[in-house]
Image: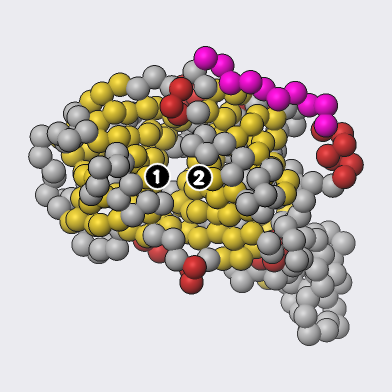
Amino acid sequence: MSTPHIAAKKPCLVTLKRKGKAYFWCQCGLSKSQPFCDGSHNGTGFEPLIYKAQKDGEEVLFCACKQTKNPPFCDGSHNALDDSYEEASPEDIAASASLPIIPPDEKGKAVLDGGCYVVTPTKTTAHHVGGWQIRPVIAGRDGARFLSQFLLQPGPDAQALTVEGSEMVLFLNQGSAHITIGGKIFKAGPQTGFYVRPGEGFHARSLSDTPIELSCVICPTGPEPTPLDTMPDIFDDRIPQRMMAMDPAKRQTMADRFYQVLVGEDMGSKQVTQFIGEIPRSRAAAHRHLYEEAITILSGEGFMWTENARAAVKPGDVIFLPKKQLHSLECTSESGMRLMGAFYPAGSPAINY
Ligand code: FES
């Protein structure tokens, strides 16, 4: 036996009991006790991999397809095993056909199951601080436990902004701009991501008549960015690269869809991963993530589904997705859907269960 058997095309969520306890992860794929070894590897040339729990009650997604490059953990490789991403079955589609479409309330928010919601940021109440227009989109009062999101528009006299003790991940939604981080200037076009380290400040200036708009995700969740009289003279030179635009060479393919990480561990982000993804006209099979996520729809329309309801989504809308919430994002546009996601804890957007 030279290649492992594909035991399943989804990882196994397991809770490990005690810190230091050894677990034997099946590498051959033949075990009937996935993801753990039951001795079926005898004579195959495969051996189980030993993993010791890092803490009491550690929750892990162990690979069951045995194609991961980061054993014993799922790294999302299971998504590339078929030509198309796993879609909702005809039975699931028929069973959910009568589920209600939740209309947005007067603040543009449609609340689904488990605290998941879709919000149209332009319907939320804006206020002005330090020359910026700020719209809170995701905050602790909305049920977010790990991240906050704000929509920011700088005026001509906008001051530098900072957040004490948190990482910030920015995304230039529209326009071209000079984004200044701690005295370093980055010239960027639309749909570009930026990483701001704790203690650093940032500033944005439009390079054209088009107003610019930034999505700002803060992690750990906290209050909105505060204005500063002067840009702090702080820039972590160990991480000089803070900007990432879309680059076809950096795309990761998942069957008929792809994603590109803009800000992640490679850029030094300890807590948040920011990515751009594209999905074709389709409805993914319902799944969950071990992370809390904020998703901004950049193009295309469709529906966000949870167990008992759905809400329409369109460009500009933001979806708040709590950790472990069962969901499915459906794209109904012929030309597909592009989205920007940011989630905590940092990792791969391909990992689901
Ligand atoms: S289950 Fe194997 S990589 Fe996800």
Q: Secondary structure at mark 2?
A: strand
Q: Are marks 1 and 2 in contact (CB under 8 Å)?
A: yes
Residue 292 pos. (x, y %)? 54, 40
Q: Residue type at mark 1: give it.
A: Asn
Q: Quadrant of the N terminus?
A: bottom right
Residue 235 seen from this side: no
| For marks 1 and 2 on the same chain, the one whose residue lies earlier in the sequence | 1
Residue at image location 18% in from the left, 39% down from the top: 160
The residue carrying mark 2 is 298
Q: CA distance from mark 1 to mark 2?
A: 8 Å
Label 1 beta carbon within 8 A of ligand 1: no
Residue at image location 58% in from the left, 54% down from the top: 278
Region rendered in magenta: 97-106
Residue 158 part of the magenta-drawn span: no
Rate crowding at label 2 as few (under 14), some (14 to 19) or many (20 or more) other CA atoms within 10 Å. Answer: many
As drawn, 64 above or below 136: below
Q: Is residue 131 left or right of residue 67?
A: left
Residue 187 occupies which quadrant of the picture?
A: bottom left
The residue carrying mark 1 is 173
Residue 266 pos. (x, y %)? 40, 64
**How many marks can you see?**
2
Q: Is residue 15 left or right of residue 91?
A: left
